[in-house]
Image (cartoon, grey):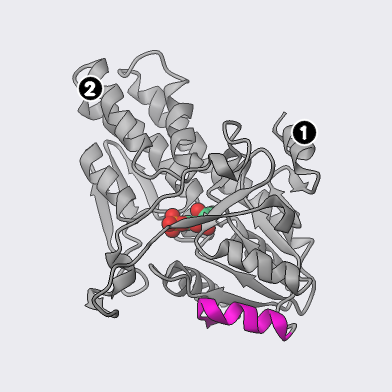
Amino acid sequence: MIEHIKFCEDHLKILDQTLLPHEKKYIECRDTKTLIEAIKSLRIRGAPALGITGAYGVVIAALESKTEKEFIEKVEKIKNARPTAVNLSWGVEKVLNSVNSFKSIEKMIQIAKNIHEEDIQKNREIGKNGSILIRDGFRILTHCNAGALATGGYGTALGIIRAAFEEKKDIMVFVDETRPLCQGSRLTAWELKEENIPCTLITDSTAGFLMQKQKIDIVITGADRIAMNGDTANKIGTYTLSVLAKENNIPFYIAAPLSTFDPCSNTGKDIKIEYRDEKEVLYLYGKKVAADVPALNPAFDITPARYISGIITEKGIVYPPYEKNIKGILK
Ligand code: MRU
């Protein structure tokens, strides 16, 4: 499996996902400025991967800082680089809370590496827990990229697909292109192709057509933040898929580690949605593909809990009533 995040002594090596699938180029983050730029421009992306990057980011901030004040300021900037994925601040806090001083660099590196390794392990457990839902012959629809690239490795939604494939189940994955930045066509399709998992790329607007024709058996996506009532933030278009799935009696599942649940968000209304530059909608690969008009570019939407059949975690599948069962699983 691809090693796309690697801490090397005094810097973080990151595979630049904006260049995939055409070019495999690593960037070296030796200071927080480079790291924050990489997060904001989606060179590294996906909620659990952002958690790991945030954790290593604390190490880079510590290596770069001369005073505690300077360190805290840099760490705050990392935490706020992207607002929706709760894992980013989770990863930062987890490292911060385990040291007393910004000089405890060795300890920080160890905690960050643990977060990284544990994430891969959690994904394998999510895979095992979720693959029970996949039957032979299933046609699975997924959105955005919730694969190895979006996590420490293996993936959440894609981890389930990987596990089902490893169990020799006959599956077909329909991959939503996921405009505007095409995480589906560039990243998910690439990951599936690398492992010879059968897949077919579709435009985002084809999903409803396939569901109506009963050509999809299950929808599985990742999550960026899950509120305590089960409302879930994920890549823009996920809400639309959930409504279409309900209309067509297709089970709709979210796959995420427990670090994606946010005890500070009671409902989806508490989740901040990131709005990105309109150029991402107006241009494709640097070429303008739209008329001279303004564009709106929310990066995420909220799927209300009532449209979610279950949330697949490393500890098992959480079913409704979510308020009670989420509290239970987080204990
Ligand atoms: O804007 P992105 O590419 O960071 O959005 C990522 C997603 O929406 C993923 O589905 C989510 O982070 C889950 S990744 C396991």
**Residue at the spot x=36%, y=24% of the render?**
106
Q: Is residue 47 above or below residue 132?
A: above
Does the image show residue 167?
no
> What's under tag 1, amino acid-wise?
Gly
Image location of residue 46, percent across then percent down: 46, 53
The furthest residue to the top = 100
Query: Mark 2 Cα within 10 Å, few/some/many (few <14, many 20+)?
Result: some
Q: Do the residues labelled 2 and 1 touch (CB within 8 Å)?
A: no
Question: Where the C terminus falls, by quadrant?
Answer: top right
Report the magenta residues as a range. 201-213
Q: Main secondary structure of the magenta part?
A: helix
Image location of residue 98, percent across then percent down: 47, 20
Quickly name the residue at label 2. 70
Residue 262 inside the magenta-drawn segment: no
Secondary structure at badge 1 equals helix
> What's under tag 2, amino acid-wise?
Glu
Secondary structure at badge 2 equals helix
Q: Write down the quadrant of residue 102 in the picture.
A: top left
Mark 2 vs ligand 1: CB below 8 Å: no
Q: Write down the quadrant of residue 70 in the picture.
A: top left
Q: Which of 2 and 280 is in front in this view?
A: 280
Q: Which of 322 and 173 is in front in this view?
A: 322
Image location of residue 311, percent across then percent down: 70, 51
Q: Which of marks 2 and 1 is nearer the N terminus?
A: 2
Describe residue 329's horizontal placement relative to residue 22 as left or right: right
Describe residue 231's horizontal placement relative to residue 138 as left or right: left
Quickly name the residue at label 1. 328
